[in-house]
Image: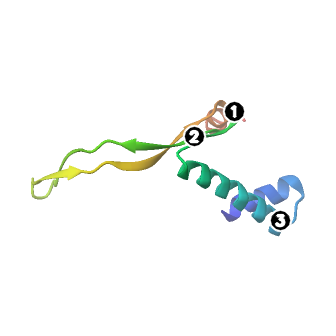
Amino acid sequence: MKSVVVGVSERTGMPTARAEEAVRAVFATIEDALGRGERVWVRGFGAFEAVTVRGRPGRNFRTGESLPATERRTLRFRPGARVLRAMEGGE
């Protein structure tokens, strides 16, 4: 998280301690919303969503034994157009 804090501090001219507070507050807000099952959309950046992955049959590759893969919650991130352009070196 240090690099994000330093980046915010440099871009805004904000002292590092204040930038860290702001970054922590943003992440805490995202965590809280995902914990409530809400989709979090950051305009131009992307969307975070907690999704449930169904259980399915699995297999232990070493022994060949069948094992159930239980249902679980995971995080899905769908990048926005600006992030995709930046990954391609455009922005």
First along the sequence among labels 1 and 2: 2
| Residue mark closest to the camera, 1 vs 2 | 2
Mark closest to the chain's N terminus, 3 or 2: 3
Q: Residue flagged by tag 2: what amino acid is it?
A: Arg
- Label 2 sits on a secondary structure element that is loop
Find the distance from the CA under tag 3 to the CA under tag 2.
Answer: 27 Å
Please name the amino acid that badge 1 sits on.
Gly
Q: Earlier in the sequence, mark 3 or mark 1?
A: 3
Bin the neighbour count of mark 1 within 10 Å (Cα to Cα): few under 14, some 14-19, many 20 and up. Answer: few
> Furthest residue to the right?
13
Please identify the residue farthest to the front as the structure is shown. Answer: 36
Which element type, helix, strand or loop, lies under badge 3? helix
All told, the count of numbered labels is 3
Please give the name of the residue rendered at 68% of the width and 33% of the height, measured from the top-left corner.
82
Residue 78 in the image, given as x and y percentages of width and height = 55, 37
* Image coords of residue 37 (percent x, y): 52, 45
In the rendering, at what x and y percent does residue 15 appear? 87, 65
Quarter of the image for the N terminus: give it.
bottom right
User: What residue is shown with label 1?
Assistant: 90
**Residue 39 numbered mark, or none:** 2
Disc 3 and disc 2 in contact, CB within 8 angstroms: no
Q: Residues within 10 Å of mark 3 (few under 14, many from 20)?
A: few
For this view, does 63 lie left or right of residue 1? left
Three-letter amino acid code at disc 3?
Arg
Q: Position of residue 61 (x, y in %)?
A: 16, 53
Would residue 18 appear left or right of 90 to someone viewing this image? Answer: right
Q: Residue at x 72, y 36 (%)?
A: 91
Residue 54 relative to residue 21: left or right = left
Residue at 54% x, 52% y: name it. Answer: 35
Helix, strand or loop for disc 1:
loop
Query: Pointer 3: what residue?
Result: 18
- Distance in Å between CA atoms under marks 3 and 1: 31 Å
